[in-house]
Every structure is written in structure tokens, then in C-alpha cells.
Image (spheres, grey):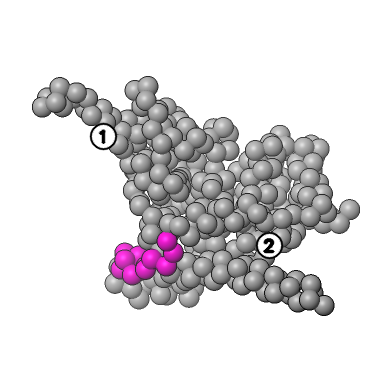
């Protein structure tokens, strides 16, 4: 009987801990939603990407709120922020930094670039050349940059939000698969609903809403979220379901190639974080299904674009044809 009471107390403490994380998420979503109206689900996915230790790609038309999302997120979480406008003449040194000779000391001194911030917005990344795009690869994967033979660590947490315009717009360079795979998630914001657009029309300027976003979390909270998400458990049956999803992408003729092991790990990492954000200490199939489109769409290619086969349609096939229970 005494042991049973201890178990109940332990369960209560665990429930309080999980509730703490879900309350933190709701506070951040509420603050960011002041600036990005009517996009609560996309905001939650962006937070999930950050808390999972990944990077985010936002693909949409100009003027849809991509920059607003990144700045409001950094303000709500109290993170250092910098924005890099990618253009065709941007050089890798403009991102990473450069050493400049100081005549007073007769030595070279390193001037860090905008990459040395906790949140970096790579705006319109597909308007720069592939050489400049590749400058982000080491930073995103290794959390460090090598400039003139010297390796320099990046701050923690380090989160890249890259935006890109649809590839059919003039002046764009499609991102190669190797670079797309560096992004944990890809989102589309889409047009606002009628109510959100009415609020936008009644505002003086959109930037007023962004400036009103208050910090609701500390850097330590973000670090703790990342650490805690790694402790979320997944049952054997849940892992079986994930493996069936992965095998589906590798065994159907419509898929040009299947999901890679890196993509599989990204799927589980994001699902665990989403479970923690919902106040649970274990993953359920709904967690996997919720984050699946954002994690997988940009990693899949159809053999043919005929009959509407796209990354989105392939994911819908996965969700509809793969059973949760075998």
C-alpha cells in the first residue's frame, strides 16, 4: 500500500512536469500569434523544429509572413537574432565573417558574420548562388564554421530559419537534395483566413504587432526542452508503425527514392518533441501523423509529376495506406 502511494506521488510529479512544458509552449504560441495571425499550427511546428534541435525551411510567396514568424519567435524566446538577405551577389564571407588586417596591431582580427547568432534568418535563400548556399551546410550540420583554417563554434541554441520563394519565380536557384535534407522541417504559411486578414487590415502597420511580442521563455528553457525531449519514450508498436511508413516510401514505384536514415531519425526526433509539447512522456501515432508532412514532404520525390504526384500527395498516400496496427 505504501509503495502504491509512492507510485501515485511519482505519477503526479511527472504529470506536473509535463504540464509545465505544454504551458510554456502555449505561452510562446500566444505571444507569437499576436504578430502572425491565424497560424497557430505553423507556429507550433516551428517551435517543435527549434526544440528538436533542427532547422526550418519556410517556402511561400513574398509577403506571407515568413520574416514576421522568425523575428517574433526570437523575441518570444529571448534569443539573439540576425537576418541575412540572400541575393545573387552575396558571398560566403558575408555570412561567415572575415579577417581584416589591423594596422595598429599589425595583426589580422576576425570580424564574425551574422551566422554567429542564435536565430539566423536566411531570407530568400534560393536567390543566391549554390556556392553561397553551401556556406550554410557546415554551420547547420556541425554547429561550427571554418574560416581561414580556424574552426569557430556557433552559439547554443543555434537555429536557422531559411525562406525561399517558389522555384517558378524569376531569379531563383533550386536547392539541391543534399541541402534540403539539412532542414528538419519545411512549412508553408498560406494565405490568412478571413478573420485574421480583417485584423491585419485594421492594424496601422504589421510591425507594431511584432514589437508587442514579449519574451516568455529563457534560453535555459529552450536548452531544457531539447534535453527533455530526448527522454520521451516510444513503444515497440509505435516504432513498428514508423518503420512501416519508412518501408512504404522505399517499396512503392511512385517514389523516386525512399526516406533516408537521416530522415527517419528526424521523424522520430520531431515526434518526441511534439509529444512533450502536448504534455506527454511517450509518443503516440497522432504525434507522428501530425509532424509527418512537415518533416517528410521535402525529402520525397515522385518518379513522375504526372497525375499530381508531389511530395504532399505522397505523404497523403502514406497516411491513408499505412495501417497504424499491423
Of 266 and 91, the residue lying toward us? 266
User: Residue at the spot x=57%, y=53% of the render?
Assistant: 227
User: Residue at the spot x=40%, y=49% of the render?
Assistant: 119
Of 62 and 92, the residue lying toward us? 92
Q: Secondary structure at mark 1?
A: strand
Q: Earlier in the sequence, mark 2 or mark 1?
A: 1
Of 191 and 247, the residue lying toward us? 247
The residue identified by callout 1 is 111
Q: Is residue 90 visible?
A: no
Where is residue 106 drawn, in percent x and y?
A: 15, 22
Q: Secondary structure at mark 2?
A: loop
Relative height, residue 153 to residue 311 (above, below): above
At label 1, counting other C-alpha atoms closer than 10 Å, the crowd grade (few under 14, some 14-19, many 20 or more) is few
| Left or right for 56, reference 277 | left
Mark whose residue sits in front, 2 or 1: 2
Quadrant of the rendered image containing residue 5 = bottom right
User: Residue at the spot x=75%, y=71% of the render?
Assistant: 7
* Residue, far left: 104
Q: Is residue 178 visible?
A: yes
Where is residue 234 drawn, in percent x and y?
A: 74, 54
* Residue, far right: 326
Q: Which residues are magenta?
A: 207-218
Image quadrant containing the N terminus: bottom right
User: Residue at the spot x=48%, y=60% of the render?
Assistant: 221
Which numbered dot is residue 281? 2
Relative height, residue 271 to residue 208 (above, below): above
At label 2, counting other C-alpha atoms closer than 10 Å, the crowd grade (few under 14, some 14-19, many 20 or more) is many
Where is residue 144 drawn, in percent x and y?
A: 44, 35
Which numbered dot is residue 326? none
Amino acid at each position: 500500500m505504501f509503495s502504491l502511494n509512492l507510485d501515485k506521488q511519482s505519477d503526479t510529479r511527472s504529470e506536473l512536469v509535463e504540464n509545465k512544458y505544454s504551458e510554456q509552449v502555449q505561452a510562446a504560441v500566444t505571444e507569437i500569434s499576436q504578430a502572425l495571425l491565424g497560424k497557430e499550427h505553423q507556429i507550433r511546428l516551428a517551435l517543435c523544429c527549434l526544440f528538436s534541435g533542427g532547422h526550418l525551411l519556410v517556402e511561400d510567396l513574398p509577403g506571407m509572413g515568413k520574416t514576421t514568424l522568425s523575428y517574433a519567435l526570437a523575441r518570444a524566446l529571448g534569443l539573439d537574432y540576425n537576418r541575412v538577405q540572400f541575393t545573387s551577389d552575396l558571398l560566403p564571407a558575408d555570412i561567415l565573417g572575415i579577417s581584416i588586417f589591423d594596422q595598429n596591431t599589425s595583426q589580422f582580427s576576425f570580424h564574425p558574420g551574422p551566422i554567429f547568432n542564435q536565430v539566423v534568418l536566411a531570407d530568400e535563400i534560393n536567390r543566391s548562388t549554390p556556392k553561397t548556399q553551401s556556406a550554410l551546410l557546415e554551420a547547420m550540420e556541425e554547429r561550427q564554421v571554418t574560416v581561414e583554417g580556424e574552426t569557430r563554434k556557433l552559439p547554443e541554441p543555434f537555429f536557422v530559419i531559411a525562406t525561399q520563394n517558389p522555384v517558378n519565380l524569376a531569379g531563383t536557384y533550386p536547392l539541391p537534395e543534399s541541402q534540403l535534407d539539412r532542414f528538419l522541417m519545411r512549412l508553408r504559411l498560406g494565405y490568412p483566413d478571413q478573420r485574421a486578414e480583417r485584423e491585419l487590415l485594421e492594424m496601422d502597420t504589421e510591425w507594431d504587432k511584432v514589437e508587442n511580442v514579449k519574451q516568455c521563455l529563457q534560453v535555459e528553457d529552450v536548452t531544457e526542452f531539447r534535453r527533455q525531449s530526448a527522454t520521451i519514450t516510444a513503444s515497440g508498436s509505435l516504432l513498428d508503425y514508423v518503420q512501416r511508413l519508412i518501408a512504404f516510401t522505399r517499396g512503392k514505384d511512385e517514389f523516386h527514392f525512399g526516406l533516408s536514415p537521416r530522415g527517419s531519425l528526424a521523424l522520430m526526433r520531431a515526434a518526441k518533441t511534439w509529444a512533450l509539447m502536448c504534455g506527454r512522456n511517450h509518443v503516440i501515432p497522432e504525434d507522428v501523423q501530425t509532424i509527418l508532412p512537415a518533416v517528410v514532404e521535402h525529402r520525397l520525390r515522385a518518379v513522375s509529376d504526372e497525375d499530381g504526384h508531389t511530395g504532399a500527395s505522397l505523404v497523403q498516400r502514406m497516411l491513408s495506406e499505412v495501417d497504424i496496427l499491423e
